[in-house]
Amino acid sequence: MGSALLWLAILVVLAGAAVVWSATPWPKLLFFYYQLYQAQRSGSRFYAECPTASKNIVHTPGMPKLDVYRPAAGSGHPVIIYVYGGSWSGGSKELYAPAAQRLLPASFVLVVPDYTLHPAAGYPRQTEEIASAIAWTLDHVAEYGGDPSRVVLVAQSAGAQISGLALLEPRWLAAHGHRLAELRGFVGISGVYDFEALLMFHAANPRAHQLILNVLGGAVNARAASPITYVAAGIPPVLLIHGDADQTVPASATLAFYERLRAAGVPSEMVIYPGAHHADILFRAMTEQPPRLFNDIIGFTRRCTADGGQTAASSDQPSESLASPAPLAT
């Protein structure tokens, strides 16, 4: 990744961190900035130099490309498809090399797809593109050392809406000859699962409210574009991660999605990160040791992809996992 993209990445993460930690004392904030800069710089080197990364793969002509990271040796590895967020309008697969850098040592194959950003695309085009990337992974990941029968989808924020819909609304995978049951699990991080609830939450915020409407193509599509609409029995295990201080996407909406999943008999966990805002779950995972977010993802993926897996319950639960969560303030 070139120096221009590195500086773009730094500006993106620092701008987000400045919003999240505006009340943090400056010495502590500056030290965090330095750690974040170092993490992004290391991730940029990793992207440029990783000998087992296959970059800019065309999964469908005319659609955005994807990257695949594979362990140095072996085959039949579990697979994570990582779909980034960014308010449907920002991000790129290259910027998420730090996530691949932290997950690859766990002996997973990592697939990181791009999707067309708003305003060039929104619902349903972005979901169509991610569904195509999921189908390509199921069809071709064995060529990169992955086991297509052990695939977990991990997605953040807007990416959780885009990919959650691709997973749960049957028509998207069916268009490629695949179905939900072929995946082993889904991890949603600070995700959007219910557009109607999100529009209500941002009713007094004209800018955010209009962005959501623009992405949807109008409020008439809010229900059809929401993963919560398609919850039914037979969904593979789900892990939902959210910060209780999130003022971009309320944790209460994730709780509602979690309760809908549980009511449908879906093996589900909800993990609350106390004091975490919308973006800092990922920011902190790029700097802290051990990285809590990535450890939770790794633990869940290993349980779901173990021989005879397909369960979210385990003695090796993520921290703060909620079996019967109390209502959360918004």
Image: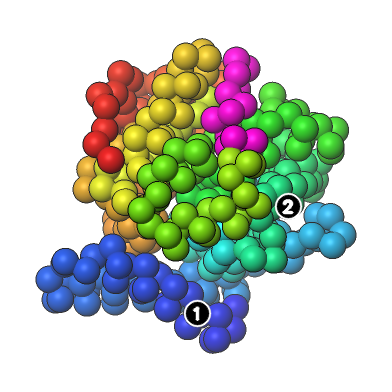
Q: Tell me how far mark 1 sits from mark 2, CA to CA.
A: 26 Å
| Quadrant assignment for the C terminus | top left
- Earlier sequence position, callout 1 versus callout 2: 1
Is residue 328 shown above or below 264?
below
Residue 305 in picture, x, y percent from top left: 57, 29
Image depth: mark 1 or mark 2 in front: 2
| Residue that appears at 33% across and 57% down | 280
Any part of residue 326 in sight: yes
Q: Residue at x 36, y 27 (%)?
A: 316
User: Which quadrant would the N terminus be assigned to in this image?
Assistant: bottom right
Q: Residue furthest bottom?
A: 3
**In this picture, is 80 found above or below 27?**
above
Image location of residue 100, percent across then percent down: 53, 57
Residue that numbered label 1 is attached to? 8
Q: Please give the label number shown on residue 125.
A: 2
| Residue 35 visible in this rendered orientation of the protein | no
How did the renderer colour the structure? rainbow
Determine the secondary structure under disc 1: helix
Please name the predominant secondary structure of the magenta segment in the image.
loop
| Crowding at mark 1 (Cα within 10 Å: few <14, some 14-19, many 20+) | few
Magenta span includes 231? yes
- The residue at 76%/37% (across/down) is 172
In the foreground, 136 or 54 = 136
Residue at disc 2, secondary structure = helix
Q: Position of residue 242 (x, y in %)?
A: 36, 42
Q: Is 13 one of the magenta-colored residues? A: no
What span is in magenta? 223-235
Amino acid type of the residue that numbered disc 1 sits on in the rendered structure: Leu
Left or right? Give the position of 214 relative to 300.
right
- The picture quadrant where one finds residue 164 is top right
Location of residue 229 by image quarter = top right
